[in-house]
């Protein structure tokens, strides 16, 4: 029994000494410096992505009610759905006034739109956790109806 306790004590002391070794601290500093550089590059690329806009040609499908405001759903020619938010800078959404959220829009079956959006940080609610968080979501910049269904 004494042998087991002394072996365990020696192993614990070795683990403590190894964790506090000077070489380990230096590598931690190097890792922190590397991480800082990587974080800087990540932040720069995120800023670049935030300012970039994307444009799609798609059909308007519906408006979905959410705790974070209405979500506008569009479907492109390939069948991909886009769920886009709006903010106070979004333009061209007048056509959605009067639509009931959650119901398919009447009169939009053959209309296509050119939708420009960008990724923007938006405060969102988490109903389950009861917390507000900030996340990147696609936000409409501008919408224009495509005439003659080009």
Image (spheres, rainbow, N blue to C red):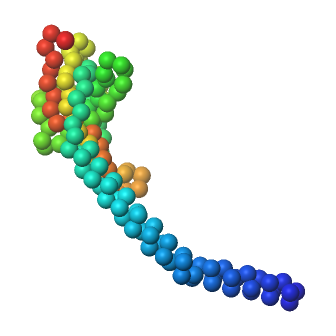
Residue 75 shown left or right of residue 140 in the figure: right
- Which x, y percent locates residue 4? 84, 83
- Which x, y percent locates residue 59? 26, 20
Quarter of the image where one finds residue 80: top left
Residue 138 shown left or right of residue 146 in the figure: right
For the N terminus, which image quadrant?
bottom right
Between 49 and 126, the one lying in front of the other is: 49
Residue at position x 19%, y 11% in the image: 149
Residue 55 shown left or right of residue 42 in the figure: left
Establish if 10 lies above or below 140.
Answer: below
- Which x, y percent locates residue 130? 37, 56
Residue at position x 39%, y 68% in the image: 33
Establish if 119 lies above or below 18.
Answer: above
Residue furthest out toward the top: 148
Quarter of the image where one finds residue 53: top left
Residue at position x 74%, y 85% in the image: 10
Quarter of the image where one finds residue 111: top left
Establish if 132 lies above or below 90.
Answer: below
Between 76 and 101, the one lying in front of the other is: 76
- Which x, y percent locates residue 43? 30, 55
Residue at position x 63%, y 83% in the image: 16
- Using the rendered image of the protein, determine whether residue 139 is visible from the camera's viewpoint: no
For the C terminus, which image quadrant?
top left
Establish if 139 lies above or below 80.
Answer: below
Count the marks. 0
- Using the rendered image of the protein, determine whether residue 27 is visible from the camera's viewpoint: yes
Between 2 and 27, the one lying in front of the other is: 27
């Amino acid at each position: 029994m004494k042998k087991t306790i002394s072996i365990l004590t020696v192993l614990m002391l070795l683990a403590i000494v190894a964790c506090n070794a000077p070489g380990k601290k230096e590598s931690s500093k190097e890792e922190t410096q590397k991480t800082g550089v990587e974080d800087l590059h990540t932040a720069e690329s995120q800023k670049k992505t935030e300012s970039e806009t994307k444009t799609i040609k798609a059909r308007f499908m519906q408006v979905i009610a959410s705790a974070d405001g209405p979500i506008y759903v569009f479907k492109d020619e390939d069948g991909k759905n886009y769920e886009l938010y709006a903010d106070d800078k979004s333009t061209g959404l007048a056509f959605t006034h009067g639509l009931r959220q959650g119901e398919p829009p009447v009169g939009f079956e053959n209309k296509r739109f050119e939708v420009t959006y960008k990724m923007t940080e938006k405060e969102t609610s988490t109903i389950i956790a009861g917390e507000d968080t900030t996340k990147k979501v696609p936000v409409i910049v501008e919408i224009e109806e495509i005439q003659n269904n080009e």
